[in-house]
């Protein structure tokens, strides 16, 4: 499997690194409404890629396809393929648990579970690992990684709902880390936060890059520009442009991209 | 009316009067609930009061199992056996109703979709509307012979029969309330857990049920309240014999059923009559406490 992926990449011009997420002719329908049209994307391993585009362009839908969470709606139909780290996530013998172990997701509104801080961090871990002995270390490591440990170490058993929104969002990132995902999907992770919280969470996301492949949906042009290395512009369910962020914001190829970036619509 | 001038500030049209009238009617409607509950309490207290004041002694009333109100020489009014009857039937009913109603609520709220869900909700509400005398009839004419046949016991009107009947009666309302409690759990919790790889059942067991536990406990308590207060079905299905049960095949008699069966045959104002009203006060107090507790729990007010 890996060889095939690598061979394919060798033939492509610029990107030497293998794709963390690769889609082929991905089409998606909500009932009879088609939301995605022939998406062919290679999201590079270990960098931050941002997804931008006006409301309803399909960027969240695409994001929610990569961990198959949009299937819980029941009326979603998908054609085409998505490979995560070289494995087709729609293959018939795929276990959703394993897909979601590889692909963590951070939501628009911080959604810590109605449990203690500690149990939130351990929730995913416990789904995969019965070993209780390591739990304390797991909690500390994950919370340290999101720069939350010093703030919450004395109240690990208090409800997570008591944290500020910024801390909640960091906790939502922390709880993904113990199972060592390869990809983190983030659906406008800062849109519910104030400017200070946004800055803190953006910094954290920047820190995590390299260890994780991060795909982030954002409405905020400035955020896409400062916090991502590659940028995908989507419009009406199609990918219009996918280049390095610097290139897209300085010399966009398409007129639609330029218009959107400059705020003429959206 | 049609004379309109600039100074006509005090002119009132029809809508003003309608508004006042509706306000008054709605106010009376709203306040009447309080008036009625106080009225009922005052009434049953007054009827039972002289019994409490004269013949009532706590141990004789609550701790004696001799309910012999019609004895010529020495009438006794001990409700212990009646309390045991009510408690045993209600307890068994809860054993039947809790798994049924929680299962149904989880299925309707978490698994069923679209038409199945709508039909089930309507059916559950329909079940809740079946008159209790019909349930009692089922206990008397269907369950009774079945229990005699299956368990080879002389009488089929017993704790088992009434417990099952009462459990099935209480289940729909418990299902309804439990389902509301599950639906009140925000969907983003489920989404978060699912995105971490939790299965449907893990989402329910680890996230949804703990988050809804207050509402679920409230549902169970309301079911208990229903069980305590139910009269006609238990009157018909328990066998109505004063007895502290030692097995589920013993006939018992419930507090409520005693009042229903005997009140019509007592002389107004007699000790027997007043003893029945004292039972009424006792039932009123218990159901009041249960419902109040359920209400407070559902609202999430707990004293820690």
Image (cartoon, helix red, strand yellow):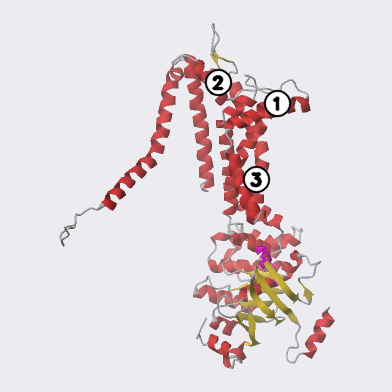
Residue B102 tag number: 3
Queried whether the magenta region covers residue A67, the answer comes back as yes
- Residue stretch rendered in magenta on the structure: A66-75
Of tags 3 and 2, which is closer to the observer?
A: 2
> Could you tell me residue B211's position as x and y percent?
60, 53
> Cα distance, mark 2 to mark 1?
20 Å
Q: Residue at x 80, y 82 (%)?
A: A5
- Image quadrant assignment for residue A161: bottom right
> Cα distance, mark 3 to mark 2?
34 Å
**In the image, A152: left or right of A177?**
left
Q: Is residue A230 visible?
A: no
**In the image, B190: left or right of B13?**
right
Q: Is residue B198 visible?
A: yes
User: Tag 1, which secondary structure?
Assistant: helix
Which residue corresponds to mark 1? Answer: B144
Task: Sort mark 2 into few (<14), some (14-19) or many (20+) by Cα contacts within 10 Å.
Answer: few
Query: Chain ID for label 3?
Result: B
Residue B261 tag number: 2
Queried whether the magenta region covers residue A108, the answer comes back as no
Q: Residue at x 52, y 38 (%)?
A: B291
> Cα distance, mark 1 to mark 3?
27 Å
Give the quadrant of the N terminus of chain A: bottom right
Task: Sort mark 1 into few (<14), some (14-19) or many (20+) by Cα contacts within 10 Å.
Answer: many
Q: Kindly check if marks 2 and 1 are in contact, taking CB atoms under 8 A apart as contact.
A: no
């Amino acid at each position: 499997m890996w060889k095939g992926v690598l061979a394919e990449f060798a033939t492509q011009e610029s990107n030497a690194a293998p794709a963390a997420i690769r889609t082929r002719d991905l089409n998606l329908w909500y009932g009879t409404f088609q939301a995605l049209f022939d998406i062919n994307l290679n999201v590079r391993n270990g960098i931050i890629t941002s997804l931008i585009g006006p409301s309803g362009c399909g960027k969240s839908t695409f994001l929610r396809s990569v961990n198959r969470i949009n299937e819980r709606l029941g009326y979603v139909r998908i054609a085409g393929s998505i490979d995560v780290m070289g494995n087709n996530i729609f293959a018939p013998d795929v276990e959703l648990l394993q897909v979601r172990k590889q692909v963590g997701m951070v939501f628009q509104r911080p959604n810590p579970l109605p449990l203690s801080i500690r149990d939130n961090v351990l929730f995913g871990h416990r789904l995969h690992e019965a070993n209780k002995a390591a739990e304390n270390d797991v909690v500390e490591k994950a919370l340290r990684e999101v720069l939350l440990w010093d703030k919450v170490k004395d109240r690990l058993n208090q409800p997570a709902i008591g944290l500020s929104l910024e801390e909640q969002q960091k906790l939502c990132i922390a709880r993904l880390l113990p199972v060592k995902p390869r990809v983190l999907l983030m659906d406008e992770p800062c849109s519910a936060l104030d400017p200070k919280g946004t800055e803190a969470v953006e910094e954290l996301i920047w820190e995590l890059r390299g260890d994780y492949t991060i795909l982030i949906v954002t409405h905020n042009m400035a955020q896409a520009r400062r916090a991502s290395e590659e940028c995908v512009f989507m419009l009406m369910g199609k990918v219009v442009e996918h280049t390095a962020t610097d290139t897209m914001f300085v010399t966009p190829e398409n007129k639609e991209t330029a218009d959107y970036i400059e705020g003429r619509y959206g | 009316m049609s004379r309109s001038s600039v100074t006509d500030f005090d002119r009132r049209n029809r809508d003003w009067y309608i508004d006042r009238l509706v306000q008054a009617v709605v106010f009376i409607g709203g306040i009447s609930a309080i008036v009625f509950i106080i009225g009922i309490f005052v009434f049953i207290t007054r009827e039972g009061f002289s019994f409490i004041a004269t013949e009532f002694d706590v141990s004789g009333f609550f701790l004696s199992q001799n309910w012999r109100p019609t004895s010529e020489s020495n009438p006794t009014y001990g409700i212990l056996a009646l309390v045991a009857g009510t408690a045993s039937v209600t307890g068994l009913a809860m054993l039947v109703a809790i798994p049924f109603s929680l299962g149904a609520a989880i299925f309707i709220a978490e698994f069923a979709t679209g038409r199945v869900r709508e039909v089930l909700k309507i059916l559950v509400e329909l079940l809740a509307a079946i008159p209790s005398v019909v349930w009692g009839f089922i206990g008397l004419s269907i369950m009774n012979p079945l229990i005699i046949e299956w368990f080879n016991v002389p009488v089929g009107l017993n704790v088992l029969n009434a417990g099952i009947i009462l459990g099935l009666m209480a289940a729909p309302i418990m299902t309804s309330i439990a389902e509301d409690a599950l639906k009140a759990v925000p969907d983003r919790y489920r989404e978060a857990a699912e995105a971490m790889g939790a299965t449907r059942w893990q989402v329910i067991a680890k996230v949804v049920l703990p988050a809804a536990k207050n509402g679920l406990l409230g549902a169970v308590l309301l079911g208990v309240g229903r069980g305590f207060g139910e009269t006609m079905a238990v009157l018909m299905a328990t066998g109505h014999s004063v007895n502290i049960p030692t097995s589920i095949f013993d006939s018992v008699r419930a507090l409520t059923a005693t009042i229903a069966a005997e009140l019509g045959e007592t002389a107004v104002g007699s000790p027997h009559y007043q003893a029945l009203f004292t039972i009424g006060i006792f039932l009123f107090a218990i159901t009041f406490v249960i419902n109040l507790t359920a209400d407070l729990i559902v609202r999430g007010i707990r004293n820690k």
